[in-house]
Structures are given as structure tokens and as C-alpha cells.
Image: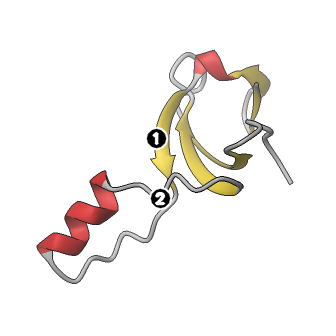
Amino acid sequence: MLVTCPTCGRRPFTEFSFGGELRDVASPDTRSDFARVYLHDNAAGPQQERWFHLLGCRRWVTLTRHTATNRVGG
């Protein structure tokens, strides 16, 4: 799987650290905050995610990945 970094271009996913599903950061209470951080949807299909370019420019990248096929983009 290749991830496109805006700074470094297309790189193998092994250079990145998975940051999780892209979620709303507003949580009205402790239960909602716990669910946002620890209870992921993990639904099959396209999902927006955050990846950290650990072995490159050390920037966060937001991308869309199809969870069933690992296809990135579109």
C-alpha cells in the first residue's frame, strides 16, 4: 500500500504510523470522549484516516482508505 505525502510524494505505508479514523474532536461528556478515542467504527468501505509520516517529513496526512481492500485515494 502506498500513501501519498504532500511533502515527500508516494511512499510505502511502512514509513507511516497509523493515527486512526478521522473523527470529530468535540465531545460533550466523558462517555462520548471515551467512545471517540477508544471505540472505533471499523466499518467496511471508504474511511477517512490520519497517518503520521514517521520516517519522512514527520507530518500528519489525512487520506481516504477502503478498509476492505486497503486501496488509498478517491
**Does 2 appear above or below 44?**
above
Numbered-mark total: 2
What label sits on residue 53 in the rendered view?
Answer: none
Compared across the picture, whether 43 is left or right of 65 comes to left
- Disc ID at residue 41: 2
Q: Residue at x 71, y 55 (%)?
A: 45
Residue 68: where, in percent of width, then height? Answer: 71, 42
Single out the residue that lies furthest toward the left.
Answer: 30
Seen from the viewer's position, the closer of residues 66 and 9 is 66
Q: Position of residue 64 (x, y in %)?
A: 71, 52
- Disc 2 + disc 1, Cβ < 8 Å: no
Q: Residue furthest bottom?
A: 28
The amino acid pointed to by label 1 is: Gly
Indicate left or right for 58 with 5 as reference. left
The residue that appears at 77% across and 38% down in the rendered structure is 69
Q: Quadrant of residue 40?
A: bottom left
Q: Residue at the spot x=66%, y=23% of the render?
A: 13
Location of the N terminus (image quadrant): top right
Asked which secondary structure carries label 1, the reply is strand
Quadrant of residue 12 in the image? top right
Kind of residue at disc 2? Asp
Horizontally, is 11 left or right of 61 in the view?
Answer: right
- Camera-side residue: 74 or 67? 67
Between circles 2 and 1, the one closer to the viewer is: 2
The residue to which callout 1 is attached is 19
- 72 up-or-down from 49: above or below: above
